[in-house]
Amino acid sequence: MSNPLPRHYGLFIDNEFVEPAGDDLLDVDNPATGEVWARVPDASAEDVDRAVRSARRAFSEGDWPGYRAADRAKLLIRIGEAVAEHAEELADLQVRENGKLHREMYGQAKLMPEYFNYYAGLAQQPLGHTNPLHLSDMINYTVREPLGVVAAITPWNSPLLLLAWKLGPALAAGCTVVAKPSEVTPVSTLRFAEIAAGCGLPPGVLNVVTGLGQPSGAALTGHPDVDKIAFTGSTATGQAIASVAGRTLKRVSLELGGKSPNIVFEDADLDSAVNGLVAGIFGASGQTCMAGSRILVQDGVYDRVVDELARRAEAIVVGDPTDAASQMGTIASRAQLEKVLHYIQVAKDDGARLAAGGEPATVPGLPNGLFVRPTVFADVTNDMKIAREEVFGPIASVLRFDSEDDAVRIANDTEFGLAAGVWTQNVQRAHRVSGRLRAGTVWINNYRKSGYSTPFGGYKQSGIGRENGPDALREYTEEKSVWVDTGQGVKDPFNPRA
Ligand code: NDP
């Protein structure tokens, strides 16, 4: 994994790497070693404009508008096959960027083709209707047409999978795309675009601009020729994007933050529940929007669950993300590590009881690695900051509840509504509680599952719109209503008997 010299990348526009207008570069470092291994352009508004113009050109001229649905489907399948062939390389790049476990990034790379295959199938499904009318001698039908140029803005936690969530339906619909990956993880997206171009993607259909949220991301979201913004990231940035989009009424889909409750009832299978709690908050070092960061446990099993969770947290092997023996990798960036450590201090100051972890972890041989110990806070109350704000790290907050009503009240007492878990062996309770939770996903006796065929997105401030599933295609299309006269010609409207 060591690299003698940082490699320089360009922007990816019109299927080739191009030099940016300015000289500003961003370092890409490996959070496990601290080594700077790549440099990418910090794109200016001029660079962004060039990428958007390329996407616009590809949308309205050249080969892409002539692609039939079947052609787009074949292309998506080819891209999926190429990703599978390059899964190891794409996993390595992402691990070098964000420090997540190699096996998780490899697993995601192997899964990505399934997303492209699914949208290849959907590209060929009927999307329109013929509509029954109150009029005679008329036919009305609706067609769904591609929205246009899509800005796909992605975060660092799962750079390529979250791009695939956008790219699958966007390309299936016939849109063109300008992707802006996180400044922390730009290289994997550049390499992905190069691989996709090699599959025969017409120039301009997928462009990549690298750079900071400000100015590159903001230049992209404010660009008048962008029709839609598909964004995954923090609620704060999502709010800023939605307000910019509002000025020109761009379409938006926003997949934002969470503070998801993972609720354990006394009648749960506790072994299974604790496994689900561990997976929910310590998987991916807690750096996932769907992290089960608020663990709600019923009185009668509270102490047992806290003790077992703390024991399991202490036993997690934090280490080199490329080592198969490691169970948790790094935090993705120094800024994010500082945020995690800040919240640990805030939780202590607010009176939460530290039951495990609570400090940086040292890993032999990796003195500059951004590691933190899996952390459990017990006796958290729902008014504490640690229960209200998204940390995006391996910090579990455990809260106590006494009744089902109490659990639902606490679970819903949040500005977020992305996901929730319910652990109980009572089938009536499982469905009853699920129905009362204000969240876009509810997992019953499992946690942290997602898939291409199932919609994912948030209630409340966790987002707008849904990714994945059949309806995601609608998010990348406009609906057109077509009226056809099948009568004997139109009469003079002011003298209909003539
Ligand atoms: P952001 O929401 O700031 O970043 C997500 C993406 O948006 C990145 O590509 C970022 O670029 C870009 N961006 C930032 N500002 C703008 C802007 N004004 N206009 C357009 N694009 C913009 O997340 P961070 O990376 O800063 O992480 C901060 C917190 O966000 C985390 O601690 C976590 O709580 C949450 N988060 C949530 C995620 C989720 O999956 N829901 C994923 C990642 C983070 P750049 O990185 O270059 O600034």
Image (spheres, grey):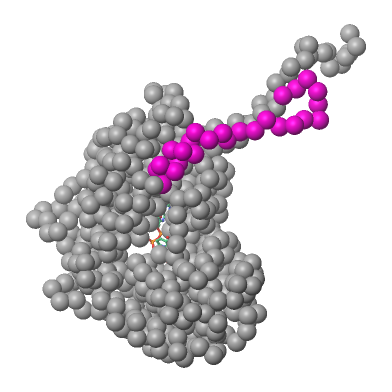
Q: In this view, does 62 lie above or below 278?
A: above
Residue furthest to the top in view is 498
- Is residue 448 covered in magenta? no
- Is residue 138 covered in magenta? yes
Residue 7 in view, yes or no: yes
Q: Is residue 75 above or below residue 362?
A: above
Residue 56 in view, yes or no: no
Query: Residue drawn at (32%, 73%), measured in percent from left and top?
Result: 338
Residue 147, percent from left and from top: 52, 36
Q: In this view, does 469 lie to the left or right of 391?
A: right
Q: What stretch is highlighted in magenta?
A: 115-139
Residues 395 and 106: in front is 106
Query: Residue drawn at (46%, 77%), measured in percent from left and top?
Result: 273
Ligand 1, seen in the image, is in the quarter at bottom left
Which quarter of the figure is the N terminus placed in? bottom left
Q: In this view, does 326 lie to the left or right of 268?
A: left
Q: How many labels does the image show?
A: 0
Residue 485, percent from left and from top: 73, 18
Query: Residue drawn at (33%, 39%), measured in percent from left and top?
Result: 79
Question: Which quadrant of the structure image shows residue 326?
Answer: bottom left
Q: Is residue 364 above or below residue 288?
A: below
Query: Residue drawn at (38%, 32%), measured in percent from left and top?
Result: 74
Residues 153 and 423: in front is 423
Which quarter of the figure is the C terminus placed in? top right
Residue 67, percent from left and from top: 43, 26
Residue furthest to the left in view is 4
Q: In this view, does 365 lie above or below 12?
A: below
Q: In this view, does 66 lie to the left or right of 413?
A: left
Residue 234, percent from left and from top: 45, 61
